[in-house]
Image: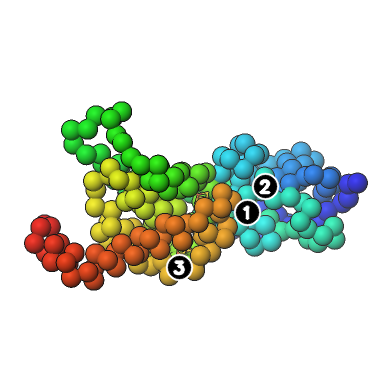
């Protein structure tokens, strides 16, 4: 049975805006994105929202529902009480373009700062060999749909715009970890994680892991192991001596 749901949606642009109230029909089995689409079709034709797959796989429809970072297409209306006001706002960490659409270029800039996979010299593509355990480790990280909800949630940048330059965020520190754990990658990711990508700013709050729609254990499987590798490099006297003697 359908019902009339109450919604509060943020409308505005880079110059400012505010929450607007709407009453919209809700039907069984619907998700928040269905409601936003009905709102566009019936009351607010110019409401801006980014979406693509409606299947939790493209990572486009990221926003905040009742203050929680969520994919709009994967948030079922059945999780809310019928008399509850459902508030939909754009991701807070990124600049608003219009309504629910934010400018996520920060993420692409951070992606570009990570040097590509550096295979060993003299081994042709197709001749790379690695063990199954190493394949499986990176497989988890490869599930990322680049929704940037983890980036949006991490307090290091959510509340501190000034950290954006130094901090790549959980998604891209995870990418650095993926490359570091790749047995054939020859670049020095440990040093770069700390000095170029801001790993030291992460204080393991795990909020990134909590919001990941792919349930990737970002903190436990990528960030903490990277921190351990940084600590090993720094405090292991043999490693330290090796670095002194053999590194430029
Ligand atoms: Fe989204 Fe998870 Fe990828 Fe972060 S790690 S961008 S939350 S899928
Ligand atoms: Fe941020 Fe995740 Fe670390 S939320 S502080 S990157 S554990
Ligand atoms: Fe693709 Fe929601 S529309 S993840």
Dot 2 beta carbon under 8 Å from ligand 3: yes
Q: Which of marks 3 and 2 is nearer the N terminus?
A: 2
Would you say residue 245 is visible in this rendering?
yes
Residue 232 position (above or below residue 178): below
Residue 42 relative to residue 158: left or right: right
Residue at figure coordinates x 38%, y 67% from the top left:
201
Distance from disc 3 to disc 2, alpha carbons, whole Å, reads 26 Å
The residue carrying mark 3 has its beta carbon less than 8 Å from ligand 2 = yes
In this view, 181 is above or below 156: above
Q: Mark 1 points at which residue?
A: 70
Q: Which residue lies furthest to the left in this view?
A: 245
Mark found first going from the N terminus, 1 or 3:
1
Q: Name the residue under label 3.
A: 204
**Helix, strand or loop at disc 3?**
loop
Asked whether 4 or 99 is in front, the reply is 4
Residue at 41% x, 66% y is 202
The residue carrying mark 2 is 74
Q: In which quarter of the image is residue 196?
A: bottom left
Whole-angstrom CA distance, mark 1 to mark 3, is: 21 Å
Q: Which residue is drawn at 38% across and 49% down?
A: 178
């Amino acid at each position: 049975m359908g019902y009339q749901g109450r919604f509060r949606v943020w409308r505005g642009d880079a110059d400012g805006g505010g929450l607007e109230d709407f009453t919209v029909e809700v039907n069984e089995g619907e998700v928040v994105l269905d409601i936003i689409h009905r709102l566009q079709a019936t009351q607010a034709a110019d409401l801006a929202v980014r979406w693509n797959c409606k299947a939790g796989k493209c990572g486009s429809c990221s926003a905040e529902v009742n203050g929680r970072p969520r994919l709009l297409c994967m948030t079922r209306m059945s999780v809310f009480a019928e008399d509850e006001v459902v508030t939909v706002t754009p991701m807070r960490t990124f600049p608003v373009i219009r309504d629910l659409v934010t400018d996520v270029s920060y993420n692409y800039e951070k992606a570009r700062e990570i040097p590509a996979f550096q295979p060993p010299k003299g081994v042709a593509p197709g001749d790379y060999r690695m063990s199954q355990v190493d394949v499986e480790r990176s497989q988890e990280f490869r599930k990322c749909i680049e929704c940037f909800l983890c980036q949006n949630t991490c307090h290091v940048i959510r509340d501190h715009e000034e950290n954006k330059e130094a901090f790549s965020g959980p998604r891209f520190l995870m990418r650095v970890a993926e490359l570091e754990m790749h047995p054939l990658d020859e670049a020095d990711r440990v040093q770069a994680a700390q000095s170029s990508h801001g790993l030291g700013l992460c204080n393991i709050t795990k909020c990134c892991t909590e919001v990941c729609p792919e349930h990737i254990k970002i903190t436990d499987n990528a960030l903490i192991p990277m921190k351990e590798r940084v600590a090993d490099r720094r405090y292991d006297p043999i490693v330290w001596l090796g670095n002194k003697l053999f590194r430029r």
